[in-house]
Image: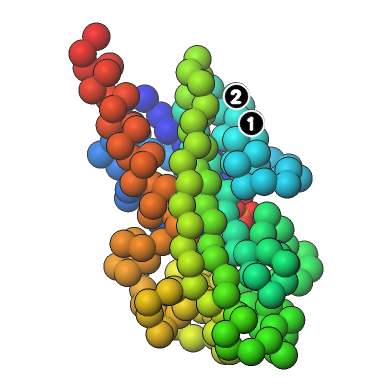
């Protein structure tokens, strides 16, 4: 079976990606398992360019297929920030909960109706010898006034999806797998990978 490496250091992402990719005809590995020391610079200004770069570097280093995820949170009242810099918002070396608190501080004076935000996710698939492809997803919502919940990662404790009144970290895995930005992109990626498998079976 061909190898597919999930090109991320973020264990929250690995957890959400791994189960969806199993059953697509590839043997799934995390970056931690195959190349714990490999670091990829992320300095592009779009999710797509960052995702493609992470997938390319990992695929070329490990000579196998790679899927990378670049994602983040865009807050209208902050002019779209933190966006592609979501992982570093508030400073280097902070825990996820500290980044959530930094975001709540920045929005302290912003009234409820202006706390609109969305998560973006771009998944890039890089298979040696094939054109790279990207899939994306968006989850609309708002930023709450406090952290709540234990599930998920990143900004899940402060993000309330549109149509719900609790944070993603309270709503948990089942809801997130159904509605999230990553789930939407993953569903397109799964369809694409299954298409490749049928194509190969036909040859
Ligand atoms: P890799 O580059 O190794 O994949 P990273 O955490 O640095 O890991 P990104 O540069 O894509 O990844 O940063 C995305 C950040 O956006 C991530 O660290 C979270 O803080 C946030 N984020 C992305 N998806 C999220 C989700 O589903 N729930 C909560 N926060 C999310």
Q: Dot 1, how many residues are within 10 Å of its Cα: few (below 14), some (14-19), or many (20+)?
A: some
Mark 2–mark 1 CB contact (< 8 Å)? yes
Q: Which residue is mark 2?
A: 60
* Picture quadrant of ligand 1: bottom right
Disc 2 to disc 1, how far (Cα)?
5 Å
Q: Is mark 1 within 8 Å of ligand 1?
A: no
Residue 171, position as x, y percentages in the image: 36, 77
* Residue 64 appears in view: no
**Would residue 25 be found to the left or right of residue 17 on screen?**
left
Q: Quadrant of residue 174?
A: bottom left
Which of 145/26 is in front?
145
**Would residue 105 be found to the left or right of residue 158 on screen?**
right
Outermost front residue = 113
Residue at x 58% of width, y 88% of height: 112
Q: Secondary structure at mark 2?
A: helix
On screen, residue 17 above or below 125 = below
Outermost right residue = 91
Residue at x 38% of width, y 80% of height: 164
Residue at x 68% of width, y 55% of height: 84
Q: Secondary structure at mark 1?
A: helix
On screen, residue 112 above or below 61 = below
Which numbered disc covers residue 57?
Answer: 1
Placement of the C terminus among the 4 image quadrants: top left
Which of 78/130 is in front?
78
Which numbered disc covers residue 140?
Answer: none
* Residue 61 appears in view: yes
Residue 135, position as x, y percentages in the image: 46, 41
Q: How many marks?
A: 2
Residue 101, position as x, y percentages in the image: 67, 82
């Amino acid at each position: 079976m061909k190898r597919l490496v999930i090109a991320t250091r973020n264990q929250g992402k690995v957890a959400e990606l791994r189960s969806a990719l199993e059953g697509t005809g590839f043997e799934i590995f995390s970056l931690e398992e195959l190349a714990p020391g490999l670091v990829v610079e992320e300095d592009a200004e779009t999710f797509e360019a960052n995702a493609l770069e992470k997938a390319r570097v990992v695929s070329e280093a490990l000579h196998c297929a790679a899927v990378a995820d670049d994602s983040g949170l865009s807050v209208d009242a902050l002019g779209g920030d933190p966006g592609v810099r979501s992982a570093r918002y508030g400073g280097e070396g902070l825990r996820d909960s500290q980044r959530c608190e930094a975001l709540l501080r920045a929005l302290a004076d912003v009234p409820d109706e202006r706390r609109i935000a969305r998560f973006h996710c771009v998944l890039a698939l890089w298979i040696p010898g094939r054109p790279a492809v990207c899939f994306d997803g968006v989850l609309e919502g708002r930023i709450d006034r406090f952290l709540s919940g234990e599930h998920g990662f990143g900004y899940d404790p402060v993000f309330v999806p549109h149509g719900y009144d609790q944070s993603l970290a309270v709503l948990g895995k089942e809801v997130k797998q159904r509605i999230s930005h990553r789930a939407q992109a993953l569903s397109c990626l799964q369809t694409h990978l299954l298409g490749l498998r049928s194509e190969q079976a036909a040859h």
